[in-house]
Image (spheres, helix red, strand yellow):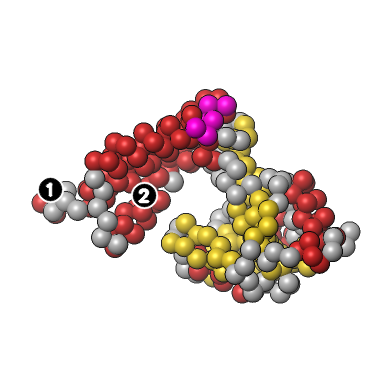
Amino acid sequence: MKKLPISVCIISGAEAHRIRKALESVAGWVSEIVLVLNEEAHDGTEEIAREFGAKIFREKWKGNIAQKNSVLEKAEHPWVLAIDADEVISPALREEITRLFSETEDAKRHPAYDFPRCTFYCGRWIRHGDWYPDRQTRLWRKGHARWGGIDPHDRLLVDGTKGKLHSDLQHFSNDSINRQIQKIVPFSDAFVEQNLAAGRISGWSDFLIRPIWRFVRGYLLRLGFLDGWPGYYIAWMAAFSAVTRHIKIREAQLPPSKK
C-alpha cells in the first residue's frame, strides 16, 4: 500500500495501556509517526511506539497547547494528522482519508478537514447528546494551522476554509465513571483560574439556570436519552460539572478567614 504524505502527530504521557490501538490505526498508510513523550513517562509507552517506527522526542511537559505545537514543528510531510493516545482512526475514516488523497488535487482544496468523534463509554458508543458528533479538526496541510485556545482546551487555528469528512474518529477517553469524575477537578481548576484572571464573577444564574440548561440540552434537545442510562448519566455529569465550576469561582473569592 502506498503511504500517504501525512505525518501523524501525537503527544503522550504514560499511555502504555492504550496507545497501541492508536498506533495500529495509522501504521502502514501514513509516511511517519511523530511522538512527543513526557520525559517522566517510563511505563513502556516508548517501547510500544518504537514497534511502529515512531520518531520519539522526550520533552518536559509544557502544557497541552505548547506540547502539541512542539510535535507539529517536528513533522516532515506536507499534511498532518493529529490524534491522541486514546483515539483510533476507524477503518471507515482511514478509507475516507485515503480516498481524499487519491482524487484530484481540487479535492484537497481545503487546507484542513474535520470529522466526527465518537466516544465509547460504559459499554456502548455514545451517538447523541453533548458528546456527538463532537467534530474535530485534525487533518490539515502543514503550515496552514497551529494549536491555540486556553489550556487544557486546545483548538486548531486554521488559515483558510475547512472541509468535512463523515466517518468517525473513535475515542476511548473514559474507561470508567471514576475516570470521568477525576477529570472534573483539573478542568474546573483551569476554568476558575481563567475566569478570575479575566475578572468574571459567577452569579445565581450560573448556579441555577446554566446546570439545568446543560441537562435539558444534552438529554432532551440533543437526544441523549437515546443512549440509555449512560446518556442520562452524561447529561447529569455535565450539569454537575457546570455548577461545580461556577461555585468554585465563588469559593476562590472568599476571604482567607472564611475558607
Residue 19 at x, y percent in the picture: 65, 52
Tell me the residue at 48%/41% (across/down). Answer: 179
Amino acid at dot 1: Lys
Q: Which residue is tagged 2?
A: 188
- The number of callouts visible is 2
| Residue behind mark 1 | 258
Q: Is residue 34 left or right of residue 227?
A: right
Query: Going 78% across and 61% down the picture, which residue do you hit?
Result: 107
Decide which of 62, 225 is in the foreground and name it.
225
Q: Give how far apart the Cα atoms at labels 1 and 2 are.
A: 21 Å
Seen from this angle, which residue lies furthest right?
1
> Where does residue 28 sit, x and y in percent of width and height?
81, 58
| Residue in the picture at 26% in, 48% down | 202
Residue 14, image x, y percentages: 56, 55
Q: Which element carries disc 2, helix, strand or loop?
A: helix
Residue occupying image coordinates x 73% and y 72%: 78
Q: Which residues, given as a range, are shown in magenta? A: 221-226
Q: Is residue 169 magenta?
A: no
> Which mark is drawn over residue 127?
none
Which callout, 1 or 2, points at the residue further toward the start of the chain?
2
Q: Would you identify the image quadrant in which residue 216 lies?
A: top left
